[in-house]
Image (cartoon, helix red, strand yellow):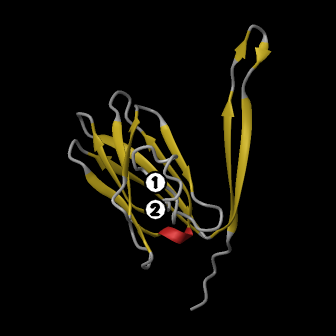
Amino acid sequence: MASTVTASTLTVSLTESITLNGQEMGATNTKTIASINEVSKRIVTVTATEAVIATFSAAAASAGHYIAADVRYIRLTNLDDSNFITLTFRNQDNDEVAIKLDAGQSFIWNGDNANGMTAVFNATEDADANSDQAFGSLTNIQADANGNSCDLEMLVASV
């Protein structure tokens, strides 16, 4: 069976709008990502117990599982109005980085332009000084809420 899905260009625009002392200090920046042919958008309930919410590998994609080399864009938005979510990103070297995503905030991770989520981060102590170490490929994203359960919106776009 031949696919009837036609790849399209994802356009992401970030706009800041603020006027200080009569001067507009905001900006709009736009990034386009060509050849997107798969989008996964879902809302997951994040509890106070850390759990994997997405995995990335070389295997076939399925619900919540993505092909790391194909992912070009990830947006995670905390839909809660008062609680934060801790997002933990892990690579194949078991390096981890944790990010606090406060109520109503979004975190965006653009994949590598050519290789998606492969070779994208190093989380060792003084990582910049260890530039001879290879960047690791994203293997999973874990999430936990700081108290009450929170809804988290995920959008993942792949080529």
Q: Nearer the viewer, residue 110 or 132?
A: 132
Q: Position of residue 40 (x, y in %)?
A: 49, 62
- Residue under the image location 72 percent in, 55 percent down: 32
Residue 33 horizontal/vertical position (percent): 68, 60
- Residue at position x 20%, y 46% in the image: 49
**Which quadrant would residue 140 be assigned to in this image?**
bottom left
User: Residue 119, position in %: x, y?
Assistant: 52, 63
Q: Nearer the viewer, residue 20 or 45?
A: 20
Q: Secondary structure at mark 2?
A: loop
Judge the density around disc 2: few (<14), some (14-19), many (≥20) Cα neighbours within 10 Å: some
In the current view of this chain or complex, which residue is farthest to the top? Answer: 21
Q: Nearer the viewer, residue 58 or 135?
A: 135
Q: Which residue is mark 2?
A: 136
Reply above or below: 83 against 127.
above
Q: Look at the image and tell me in which quarter the N terminus lies.
A: bottom right
Q: Secondary structure at mark 1?
A: loop
Cβ–Cβ under 8 Å for marks 2 and 1: yes
- Amino acid type, residue under disc 2 in the picture: Gly
Residue found 55% across the figure and 70% down from its top: 70
Residue furthest left in the image:
49
Crowding at mark 1 (Cα within 10 Å: few <14, some 14-19, many 20+): many
In the image, what residue type sits under mark 1?
Answer: Asn
**Side (left or right) of 8 relative to 130:** right
Which x, y percent locates residue 133? Answer: 48, 59
Q: 3 above or below 131?
A: below
Distance of mark 2 from mark 1, alpha carbons? 6 Å
Name the disc covering residue 122, or none: 1
Relative to residue 87, is residue 148 drawn left or right? left
In this rendering, is residue 106 above or below 133?
above
